[in-house]
Image (spheres, helix red, strand yellow):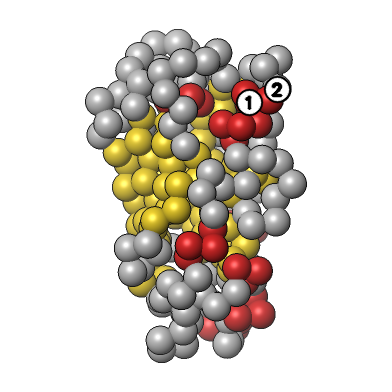
Amino acid sequence: GPETDAPDASCGPGAGEVCDTAGDEDCDGTADCADEDCAGAGACAPSCGELVRPEDALPLPDGGGTSYQGPIGVTAFADGQTLDSIDAFRGVCVDMEHTWLRDLQIEISCPSGTTVVLQMFGGQTGSEVFMGQPGPQDDSVPGVGAEYCWTPTATNPPIIDYVNQNPQIHELPAGDYQSSAPMTALLGCPLDGDWTLKVTDLWAIDSGFLFGWSLRFDPSIVADCSAWPSGP
């Protein structure tokens, strides 16, 4: 997935970002597909059925229940087409870092407003678990994100269950997880329209950064992959 890293020593004002080097050539704090200059270009172009919303190392609101809400507008399906099989929904992925996973509740809403909880806030309890590689503890500088996906076919349990079952875990492994609530609730959702990710931090002090998120459908339900949008 998209990545971000520290600026290269060789970068300088006016330098252009190179989208496949893992470096930050233009010194803006983001690299490769996480850089807005690369969104939808070359190797950063989504494949058929995938839509990506990049974020520029966006700090997530810390505690207090204020949410990040970011939509992806889908316009590529047939008029009136709905999600008729959960197998056609490949899932939702985030590229993010956070110093305390247990702070978070993460949800996805389809265009009709139906909402599924992907990561359930488990209450103000439990041990420290990182997402990705967080930056300094004062949360002033973004770290390095990792990609976490919620898919109907994941073999891992929901994230909160995974960390509770594996108390030795201190950094949540990137990969695919089941959602906290069944994704089958999305059946019947219209495909075109705004799909919205909501991330809410419900426990103060720790925080993190979002570098982007994506929505993935099985290409077999796309009538014309040649017309699939190449960027956000």
Q: Position of residue 163 (x, y in %)?
A: 63, 26
- Secondary structure under tag 2 reads loop
- Residue positioned 27% across, 31% down in the render: 65
* Residue nearest the viewer, comparing 176 with 18: 176
- Residue positioned 35% across, 51% down in the render: 70
Compute the Cα span from label 1 to label 2: 5 Å
Q: Position of residue 72 (x, y in %)?
A: 40, 61
Q: Position of residue 5 (x, y in %)?
A: 56, 30
Inspect the image, locate mark 1, and give the three-letter code of the amino acid beneath it: Val
* Residue nearest the viewer, comparing 215 with 52: 215
Inspect the image, locate mark 2, and give the three-letter code of the amino acid beneath it: Asn
- Left or right of 223: which side holds 165? right
Q: Callout 1 environment at 10 Å: few (<14), some (14 to 19), or many (20+)? A: many
Instruction: Pick out the residue farthest to the right.
Output: 155
- Residue positioned 35% across, 14% down in the render: 205
Mark 1 touching mark 2, by CB under 8 A?
Answer: yes
* Residue nearest the viewer, comparing 179 with 51: 179
Q: Quadrant of the C terminus?
A: bottom left
Residue 40 visible (yes or no): no
On screen, 139 above or below 37?
above
Q: Image quadrant of residue 148?
A: top right
On screen, 108 above or below 32?
below
In the image, which disc is placed on residue 163? 1
In the image, which disc is placed on residue 166? 2
On screen, 30 above or below 166?
below
- Residue positioned 58% across, 81% down in the render: 222
Q: What is the total number of numbered labels drawn onto the structure image?
A: 2
Residue 65 visible (yes or no): yes
- Secondary structure under tag 1 reads helix
Q: Callout 2 environment at 10 Å: few (<14), some (14 to 19), or many (20+)? A: few
